[in-house]
């Protein structure tokens, strides 16, 4: 069974079979065996309790007559634990029908009794009921997690978007007002440039919003692959940053063959996001290094490094959307989507992005790109 919305397979449902006789466990397993069910077997109550410490089960079939700890005692212990108290229990017994024993069993928490010899059709039907109930529980839990995450993401998105769009929009309005009120050529040129810079920044924010929607809702970021050289794209992006930020130092290097079958516009976006991130969070006056390693046969490595250090508590969530700008206390220049979108683009190419950061290594982001 899969999640209809995402196509994500659900884990197999687990049944616990408890009987001190191996032949009885074998018989029950043969009757209940199916691809989407995992059967856990225990030869005693103690083994059953150990399994329940590490497994969530949809149903437990427990033999009543077992040495040391009988089925009723095991059921009482299961019901006494917060973790296991809601597991449906079915007692299996070879004894004669006894209303007193049945009452004791139900009092211990059983939902049903089965008497040996067991009718296979009845056993399978009863097990199917609990299988479906557990599947519904899994599905509801999955949907709840997804909706909770979506709600959290939307709330964060609205809050950050309102903050990040306010400043460039104010600059646009002030600059436009300035142009209206003056005919001074120098002032008009500066105001026009401010309008252009703020407009570019807003355009980038909007593009990041669209990429977020594509990555999370549209089945992934679409690619337009062609044969290309990674060094050409990297050099072009680096030159754009040098022109925009003349004080920054960007060192580019390459070894080996940097050719591959990729989307040049998307990889330019990856380089721009990683380079912008390194410049923003690196140490002022220290160079950012971009290195391409094409010596491997099947992949090309792109490394972007700077002298900054990412705090250890931030590193595990470095690729989470909206969290990219949290590792320093300076002003944010975007939605915190740069690293997330870069990772999504690389993943769409079949690659991966790794980050290491420490006082010894500083910060190095490595992109692994399969050539095809």
Image (tube, rainbow, N blue to C red):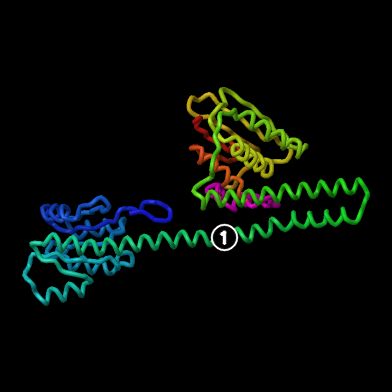
| 198 to the left or right of 65 | right
**161, 176: nearer the viewer:** 176
Query: Circle 1 is placed at which residue position?
Result: 154
* Residue range (magenta): 314-335
Whether residue 12 is situated above or below residue 106 in the rendered picture: above
Outermost residue on the right side: it is 184
- Could you say which is closer to the camera, residue 252 or residue 62? 252
**Residue 365 drawn above or below residue 13:** above
Q: Which image quarter: residue 250?
A: top right
Image quarter of residue 230? top right
Please give the name of the residue rendered at 60% of the width and 49% of the height, measured from the top-left corner.
337
Q: Residue at x 56, y 28 (%)?
A: 227
Q: Is residue 360 visible?
A: no
- Point out residue 331 in the picture as x, y percentages from the top left corner: 70, 52
Residue 285 inside the magenta-drawn segment? no
Magenta stretch: residue 322 in it?
A: yes
- Image location of residue 217, percent across then percent down: 51, 53
Report the residue at 27% width, 69% height from top: 79
């Amino acid at each position: 069974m899969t999640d209809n919305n995402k196509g994500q397979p659900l884990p197999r449902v687990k049944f616990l079979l408890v009987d001190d006789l191996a032949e009885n466990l074998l018989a029950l397993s043969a009757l209940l065996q199916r691809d989407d069910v995992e059967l856990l077997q225990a030869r005693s109550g103690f083994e059953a309790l150990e399994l329940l410490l590490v497994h969530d089960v949809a149903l437990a079939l427990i033999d009543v007559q077992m040495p040391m700890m009988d089925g009723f005692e095991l059921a009482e212990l299961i019901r006494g634990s917060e973790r296991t108290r809601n597991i449906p229990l079915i007692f299996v017994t070879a004894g004669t029908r006894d209303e007193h024993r049945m009452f004791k069993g139900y009092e211990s928490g059983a939902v049903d009794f089965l008497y040996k010899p067991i009718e296979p059709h009845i056993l399978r039907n009863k097990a199917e009921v609990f299988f479906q109930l557990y599947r519904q529980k899994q599905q509801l839990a999955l949907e709840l997690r997804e909706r909770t995450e979506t709600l959290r993401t939307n709330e964060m998105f609205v809050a950050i978007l309102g903050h990040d769009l306010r400043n460039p929009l104010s600059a646009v309005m002030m600059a436009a007002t300035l142009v209206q009120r003056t005919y001074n050529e120098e002032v008009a040129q500066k105001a026009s440039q401010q309008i252009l810079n703020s407009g570019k920044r807003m355009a980038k924010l909007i593009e990041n919003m669209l990429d977020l929607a594509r990555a999370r809702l549209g089945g992934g970021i679409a690619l337009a692959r062609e044969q290309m050289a990674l060094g050409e794209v990297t050099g072009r992006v680096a030159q754009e940053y040098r022109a925009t930020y003349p004080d920054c130092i960007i060192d580019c290097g390459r070894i080996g063959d940097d050719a591959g079958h990729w989307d040049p516009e998307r990889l330019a976006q990856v380089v721009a996001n990683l380079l912008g991130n390194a410049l923003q969070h690196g140490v002022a006056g220290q160079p950012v290094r971009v290195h391409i390693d094409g010596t491997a046969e099947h992949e090309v490595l792109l490394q972007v490094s700077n002298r900054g250090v990412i705090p250890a508590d931030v590193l595990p969530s470095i690729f989470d959307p909206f969290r990219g700008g949290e590792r320093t206390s300076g002003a944010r220049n975007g939605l915190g989507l740069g690293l997330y979108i870069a990772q999504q683009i690389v993943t769409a190419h079949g690659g991966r992005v790794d980050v290491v950061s420490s006082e010894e290594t500083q910060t190095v982001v490595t992109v692994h790109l399969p050539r095809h």
